Image (tube, rainbow, N blue to C red):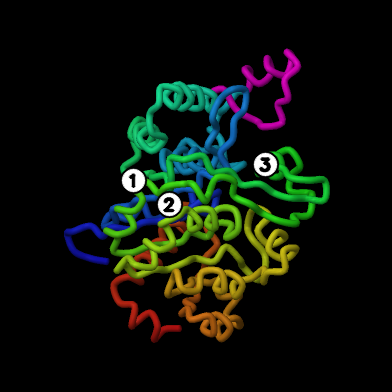
Amino acid sequence: MSGASKHKVTLLAGGVGGAKMAEGLAALPDVELSVIGNVADDDEFHGLWVSPDIDTLTYSLADVIDRNQGWGVADESHRALDTLTRLGNDTWMSLGDRDFGLHIHRTMRRLRGERPSVIARDVARAFGIAAEILLPTDDRVQTRVRTDAGWLSFQEYFVRERCAPEVRELAFDGIEQARPTPEALAAIAGADLIVIAPSNPLVSIAPLLATPGIRDAVRAAPAFKVAVSPFIAGKVVKGPADRMMAVLGLRADAAGVAERYAGVAQTLVIDHQDEGLCDEIRAHGMTPICAHILMKDKTDKARLAREVADLCLAPAAAEAVA
């Protein structure tokens, strides 16, 4: 990408991997970034509506994220949670005092009937974020996880149970009735490049694409479409995606990612360690591009984002490299 004009990039993202990809793309001076974030992890705690993936995007792009744990606010205290614990409340969902402020603000505005998309936009602006943080839907969609002990909310599985139970089935409550936001559809239709972040394909990207109208919009968009694998040599950097895919009978590697995104993205960026999977990825109709996809710091994020963003300039050249 070069020249004075900025290129419009729309990122589909969830979790820490999605936030890292968003940071890298936001750092590129020639990119106008829109991020459509996962809302299926949302849940209610202590009467407040919490949106973990959207908040992780917000805190990361605002550079106030707790870098050690990958979520929450840096230099955080937990006095409100301590009081809730003393009063006998279940406090396995760790929410810091500054974090509580955002949840209170969001919940107050939702109770007034304001659109969640507008709230997310205003929060991003208040945090000084130039990128657009968009929601796929303003409707309530929540991931459920079936284990041997029954159905759990995603946060119960992910935080309270620490991903320990085996996953037998996934469901997205409310997805059939959900309506896509006009902002998300516009960002997809107007993009020069659509990127699927190295997020969990099953619980971060799947609910995004399952939102009625979103998958069709991505397919119909004239933009070049590229996905970044969350796997390196059959393992994920963070999160339960590898275990989840394996136990559900899916390929837990870059080839399994290609199978899931076939027909949605044209190209899959994989790590050099997975070069041996290129033929299988091509068999799914996707062009593999090898890169160093581990994002440990700002330099890694910007480098990978640069490589991914440049793919939309010359897809023919990119295919020749594969």
Q: Residue at x 43, y 40 (%)?
A: 138
Q: Residue at x 78, y 50 (%)?
A: 147
The residue that disc 1 covers is 131
Label 3 SS: strand
Outermost residue toward the front in this view? 177
Q: Residue at x 60, y 42 (%)?
A: 68
Q: Amino acid at mark 2?
A: Ala
82 magenta-colored: yes
Outermost residue toward the left in this view? 4
| Image side of residue 169 versus residue 295, left or right | right
**Mark 2 and 1 residues: CB-CB less than 8 Å, in contact?**
yes
How many numbered discs, if any?
Answer: 3
Residues at marks 2 and 1, CA–CA distance in whole angstroms: 9 Å
Magenta region, residue range: 78-97
Mark 2 or mark 1: whose residue is earlier in sequence: 2
- Quarter holding the N terminus? bottom left
The residue that disc 2 covers is 22
Q: Residues within 10 Å of mark 1 (few under 14, many from 20)?
A: many
Q: 276 above or below 104?
A: below
**Mark 2 and 3 residues: CB-CB less than 8 Å, in contact?**
no
The residue that disc 3 covers is 153
Q: Amino acid at mark 1?
A: Ala
Q: Residues within 10 Å of mark 2 (few under 14, many from 20)?
A: many
Residues at marks 2 and 3, CA–CA distance in whole angstroms: 26 Å
Query: Where's residue 274, x and y in %?
Result: 60, 76
Query: Where's residue 279, x and y in %?
Result: 56, 86
Mark 1 or mark 3: whose residue is earlier in sequence: 1
